[in-house]
Amino acid sequence: MSVLKKILIGLLLLFVIMQFFRPEKNIDSNDSLTTFIKETKPSTKVQNILSKACYDCHSNNTNYLWYNNITPINFWMANHIKEGKDELNFSEWASYSTKRKKHKMEEVYEEVEEKHMPISPYLITHSEANLTDEEIKQLVDWAKEQHNNY
């Protein structure tokens, strides 16, 4: 057997073994967004935008697609989700101070308005999260209104 074949077989075995090691999934059985929704009162349209473009990475409940079952993709995804939740977690809204809520709403409208959110890697596999100009306006207007309410 040639060296190349041995290397390929070794890599294949490593890949198979890696499939047995997975990060913990970001799935919460509770309706953890209730406080956020009650307090910020997004319209149905804004709620739909938040659901399709924000909650997967910015809440305690991610809707996983098939590719998240493949290691190392699932570790990469888990890292993105962790970073997103560290920056803003709508599920933890009740624990934020008024000052922090005001600042987070400012970040929401700035990041969306500047088209930094949703991030490009997310849009590759979630084309529905690619916001139209009208959706951006609706989300930005709502976030600005919330910012002014704090």
Image (cartoon, rainbow, N blue to C red):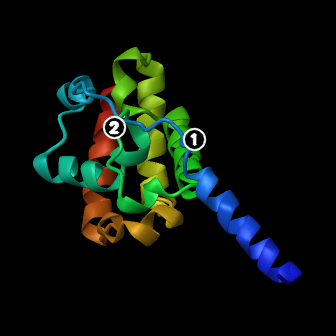
Question: Where residue 46 appears, x then y in whole percent?
Answer: 21, 50
Give whichever of 93, 8 is nearer the camera: 8
Question: Where residue 25 appears, x then y in whole percent?
Answer: 43, 38
Left or right? Give the position of 20 relative to 33. Answer: right
Q: Residue at x 41, y 18 (%)?
A: 98
Left or right? Give the position of 138 relative to 117. Answer: left
Question: Where residue 120 appears, x then y in whole percent?
Answer: 51, 66
Residue 11: quarter of image? bottom right
Residue 91: quarter of image? top left
Q: From what the image shows, is residue 20 above or below residue 27?
A: below
Give whichever of 77, 54 is nearer the camera: 77
**Secondary structure of the residue carrying numbered label 1:** helix
Q: What type is the residue that disc 1 sits on? A: Glu
Left or right? Give the position of 72 relative to 24. Answer: right
Q: Residue at x 30, y 35 (%)?
A: 146
Q: Residue furthest front?
A: 1
Q: Residue at x 11, y 48 (%)?
A: 44
Question: Where residue 39 appears, x then y in whole percent?
Answer: 22, 25
Point out the tag, 1 or 2, that comes first from the N-terminus: 2
Q: Which residue is mark 1?
A: 83
Mark 1 closeness class: few <14, some 14–19, many ≥20 residues within 10 Å: some
Which circle, 1 or 2, is nearer the viewer?
2
Q: Which residue is mark 2?
A: 61
Give whichever of 139, 24 is nearer the camera: 24
